[in-house]
Image (tube, rainbow, N blue to C red):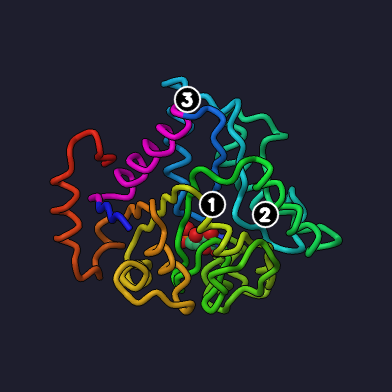
Amino acid sequence: MEVIISETAEASSSAAARVVARQVRENPESVLGLATGSTPLKLYRELIRLHREEDLDFSRVTTFNLDEYVGLENDHPQSYHAFMHENLFRHINIPAPQIHIPDGMTPDIPMFCEGYERRIADAGGIDLQVLGIGSDGHIGFNEPTSSFASRTRIKTLAQPTVEDNARFFDGEVSRVPRHCITMGIGTIMSARRVVMLAFGEGKAAAVAAAVEGPVAALMPASILQHHPDAKFFADEAAASQLKLGDYYRWVYAGKPEWQRDA
Ligand code: GLP
């Protein structure tokens, strides 16, 4: 993993947005894997700005979102469908048929999940996957002990995740859905490039374990140590428990200008 530490979440997000923008400019038909949660919000804001002010064109891009809650209608305000529409899609020029988000209301979950994997394959696979990290180390909704070989499927949310996400449901834990459909860790690892983001002290322990700990199913994000092209953008707070923080800064500062994102 390449660890890129920036002073603030804003600086990290702009740097990550430059990586996504370069991907889309180099291949206008890029297939992007997208994430929800509070972490990618600033990245999406920057992509919207690049679209408006610097002609970043999404008209031929295809997207696949990581996950969705089971049992929420697409127009439920806390659904990831609503989140993506509100925070990205309605502000850029991506045609609706090119947008894919798991359907939390599907009557046949296993069949839907198989079809989702097939659609990703038919699109040519994911070129660049945007990822956040849960405080328990989850990626997508792949909770601790998820198989590293897993593909899109139904999962039960772990208690820390339900508690973390209760803030989006008026703080009421009982209103948070218990199940979700999520791309698997195998699906995520098949993406050609991964751009991972983590901000704030609440993520510091998970970041340190994912980057410097052993690769273990108890810490799903640690599998990215095996990904050939994963960049991990963290702000100072999220990077605060890394043992080798100075080393990552030194390595990054020594890179030639054209290889730097931040
Ligand atoms: C959520 C999402 C993940 C996200 C993570 C962190 O539950 N399913 O994809 O990365 O948890 O969320 P946040 O960015 O709000 O901290």
Q: Is residue 113 above or below residue 7?
A: below
Name the spot of residue 173 as percent of width and height, x first: 62, 74
The residue where tag 2 is placed is: 79
**What residue sits 64% from the left and 52% below the top?**
80
What secondary structure is marked by label 3?
Answer: loop
What secondary structure is marked by label 1?
Answer: loop
Tell me the kind of residue under disc 1: Ala
Q: Is residue 109 magenta?
A: no
Q: Can you say which quadrant of the picture contains the N terminus?
A: bottom left
Q: Main secondary structure of the magenta part?
A: helix
Q: Is residue 83 left or right of residue 3?
A: right
Name the spot of residue 45 as percent of width and height, x first: 46, 38
Alpha carbon separation for disc pair 3 and 1: 19 Å
Alpha carbon separation for disc pair 2 and 3: 27 Å
Res. 56 mark: 3
Sequence order check, earlier mark of 2 and 3: 3
Alpha carbon separation for disc pair 1 and 2: 13 Å
Q: Is residue 28 above or below residue 10?
A: above
The residue where tag 1 is placed is: 35
Question: Dot 3: few (<14), some (14–19), or many (≥20) neighbours within 10 Å?
Answer: some
> Do the residues under discs 2 and 3 have CB atoms within 8 angstroms?
no
Tell me the kind of residue under disc 3: Leu
Q: Is mark 1 within 8 Å of ligand 1?
A: yes
